[in-house]
Amino acid sequence: MTDLTPLIVAAVAAAAALGAALIAAVVTAWVWTMRRMLRAEAHNVQLWRYTRTLIDHIYRGLGSPPPEPPESIRHIYESGDPS
């Protein structure tokens, strides 16, 4: 029985290390996803605000030029990439 003790301890240690690595990977992926979702939500709010500004501009008949987009979402209009 004592000859298997180091093997059992090594197997438990390896399983614990694998479990810790898996948990770390899942938490990292979750944090990355949450940051990306928060950034996308912030862009969405800013886009809706800018859309409302454009609608108000047209409704009031203010003519050309339309208002410029805010700096926080200007890159979407310049590159077409929302990320």
Image: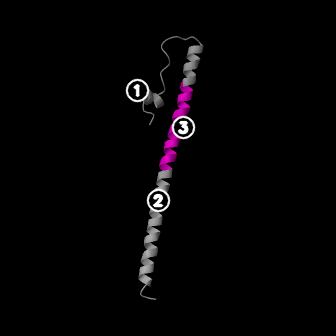
Up/down of 4 relative to 11, above or below: below
The x and y percentages for residue 54 are: 54, 20
The residue indicated by pointer 1 is: 78
> Is the Cβ of the residue at disc 2 closer than 8 Å to that at disc 3?
no
If you read the primary sequence from the N terminus, does the residue marked by circle 2 or circle 3 appear first?
2
| Residue 36 highlighted magenta (yes or no) | yes
Question: Which residues, given as a range, are shown in magenta?
Answer: 31-50
What is the quadrant of the C terminus in the image? Answer: top left
Alpha-carbon distance for marks 2 and 1?
37 Å
The x and y percentages for residue 42 are: 53, 36
Alpha-carbon distance for marks 2 and 3?
26 Å
In percent of the image, x 52 and y 42: which residue is there?
Answer: 37
In percent of the image, x 56 and y 28: which residue is there?
Answer: 48
> Is the Cβ of the residue at disc 2 closer than 8 Å to that at disc 1?
no
**Res. 41 mark:** 3
The residue indicated by pointer 2 is: 24
